[in-house]
Image (cartoon, helix red, strand yellow):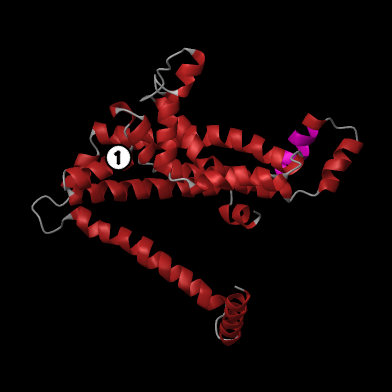
Amino acid sequence: MSTRQSRLRTVTRTVGEQLGGRVGNRHLAALGLGFVGVFFVLPILLLVPESLALGTSAPFQAYSRAMQGIYVNAFVRSFLYGIMTTVATLSLAYLIAYYLAFAARRIRMAMTLVIVPLWIAYIVRYFGILLFFSPAGPLADATGYEPSILFTTPAVVIGLANVYLPFAVLPIYNSLNAIDRELVSASRVLGATNWRTIISVIFPLSLPGLVAAGLIVFILAAGSFLGPAVLGGPKQTMIANVIAQAFLDNFNIQFASALAIIYTVLLVGLLLVFNTAFDLREVLGNI
């Protein structure tokens, strides 16, 4: 085993020395931008001509259909669920991150408990919540009460918040952990209570992580497919479910492309509005 490790280290060192003078930050940036361009920007651009169907007799039919009430409701519901999930997730994540940053004694074990859920597939975690709230689940067995929360809006929001909670804890913890402890001590020396210190010192300094966490959770939650598919009913259908149904079940590529383009434009527009209130470049740079 030691021989293999020494050989691996030798090969790694040799490759690193050869590439050290040839590969710079520009090359790494170009590689990342190229990956994003090929696998993110280009597919979205290809959806535009597909959604327009300019060679047909009704080129904008898909967009006019997307403006009908049932699909508008799906757009509104998606962003509404995204906001509700973000508020619930940030509330829980801030408490957990604060405990990790200021009160946890075994920080490695606590962080492991936060990160481990990321190793479990989303579908498994959603079905775990489904089983927990089912009439024959452990909650009903322990309390004797059969919950009726499944296939409702609260069930979807709880599921989304549970799945995306680690994505909020990590950036908030990073901001809280970066706070100079001397500032906290100075606030308490000057007579501020713990609550006053949190409101006046800790919370303002942790806003970059809070904003970044909210941005991540909102984007992920608003575009969720599995959450409403497993925990929701027909009245909890989100736009990702509508797009999947249009493409996979009805094989209507034009309509699915139009819905995807509209959703992308709305999401980017909301992010631009959000950027006017919070400078995202500064926020993300302070994490």
Q: Is residue 56 left or right of residue 127?
A: left
Residue 17, how many percent across, how many down? Answer: 61, 85
Q: Is the stretch drawn in magenta largely helix, strand or loop? A: helix
Q: Is 142 located above or below residue 233 in the figure? A: above
**Nearer the observer, 113 or 243:** 113
Q: Which residue corresponds to mark 1?
A: 241
Please tell me which residue is depicted at 62% across the width and 46% down the height of the picture: 112
Residue 115, how many percent across, how many down? Answer: 57, 47
Which quadrant holds the N terminus?
A: bottom right
Q: Is residue 92 magenta?
A: no
Name the kind of residue labelled 1 in the image. Answer: Asn
Count of marks overlaid on the render: 1
Q: Is 199 located above or below residue 265 in the figure? A: above
> Picture quarter containing residue 230?
top left
Q: Is 87 located above or below residue 39 in the figure? A: above
Please tell me which residue is depicted at 51% across the width and 47% down the height of the picture: 118
Q: Is 80 located above or below residue 167 in the figure? A: above
Q: In this view, does 264 lie to the left or right of 258?
A: right
Please tell me which residue is depicted at 40% across the width and 29% down the height of the picture: 130
**Nearer the observer, 34 or 53:** 34
Q: In this view, does 73 lie to the left or right of 271?
A: left
**Nearer the observer, 168 or 99:** 99
Residue density around tag 1, few if under 14, some if 14–19, many if 20 or more, within 10 Å: some
Please tell me which residue is depicted at 37% across the width and 30% down the height of the picture: 231
Q: Can residue 75 be seen in this view?
A: yes
Q: Can residue 222 be seen in this view?
A: no
Residue 282, how many percent across, how many down? Answer: 62, 55
Bounds of the magenta segment: 196-205
**Nearer the observer, 95 or 258:** 95
* Secondary structure category for the residue under label 1: helix
Residue 143, how many percent across, how many down? Answer: 51, 14
